[in-house]
Image (cartoon, helix red, strand yellow):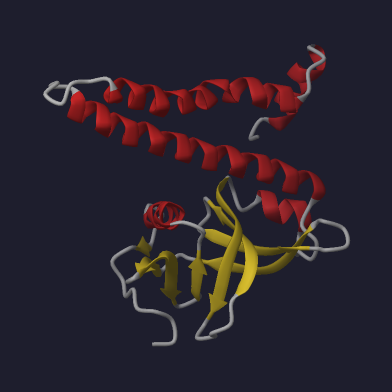
Amino acid sequence: LKEQAAVNQILAARNTEQKELISLLSKPFRHLADYPPTLQELERNMEESQADRGDTQRAVQVYRKMVDDCEAARKAGEIHLELLEIGIEGLEGGREALAGLGPLLLVASSVQVREGGLEEAETRTALLFDSAAILLLKRSAQSQTYVFVAEVRVRNSSVGRVPKKLKEVQISGEDARLSLSFGSQDEAARWVETMGGMEDVATDGPSLALGS
């Protein structure tokens, strides 16, 4: 939170914890999950010739995407708070360096990462920050904490999904060349869309598989 000190003061005055505040603020977004099944049931009971049938079907897809986007944002926010609290083992600069990366936009908890032209992939947690930085982490088996692996800057890079491997995203630039393989095509598309909206990141670059 940007105004953490002020928020803490208000919470203390009301004897409320930050987790409770976050839960209350997230209620409207959680309610979105009710819309797709409700609209599906409505569409199921419509006549084939009903003029609004097509719009109802499209509304289901729109609300599903909204639910997925809100869930991704919620997950990123929770993990960011956790990391700011417990830190990342091996990250130079510690919590200050983490806070300096700006808001955490997306989290992929189990992504297959290939760097350069390497064929072997490693399972990592990938964090995408507003500063166009990706942190790659691994879980410590002993302490269950996050361990720093690498930081990748995606500015001045091109990003895109690999043809015929739409779960895989390639990042190619002067300072970055790696492939991220996600659990679903939707997740891969969300990462490409988010990175493509950043300054000095293009989505129309080469999308050939790494090592080709």
- Position of 55 relative to 115 (above/below): above
Is 132 placed left or right of 38 in the picture?
A: right
| Location of residue 1 in the rendering, given as x and y in whole percent from the top left corner | 65, 34
Among all residues in the image, which is located at the extreme right?
Answer: 142
Is 44 placed left or right of 148 in the picture?
A: left
| Location of residue 141 in the rendering, given as x and y in whole percent from the top left corner | 83, 63
| Location of residue 104 in the rendering, given as x and y in whole percent from the top left corner | 58, 47
| Quarter residue 205 falls in | bottom left
| Location of residue 159 in the rendering, given as x and y in whole percent from the top left corner | 39, 66
Q: Residue at x 51, y 58 (%)?
A: 183
Q: Residue at x 39, y 29 (%)?
A: 36
Nearest the camera: 47 or 81?
47
Q: How many marks?
A: 0
Is 29 placed left or right of 58 in the picture?
A: right
| Quarter residue 144 falls in | bottom right
Nearest the camera: 25 or 37?
37
Q: Residue at x 49, y 72 (%)?
A: 179
Nearest the camera: 175 or 106?
106
Quarter of the image where the C terminus is located = bottom left
- Position of 72 relative to 185 (above/below): above
Among all residues in the image, which is located at the extreme top?
Answer: 14
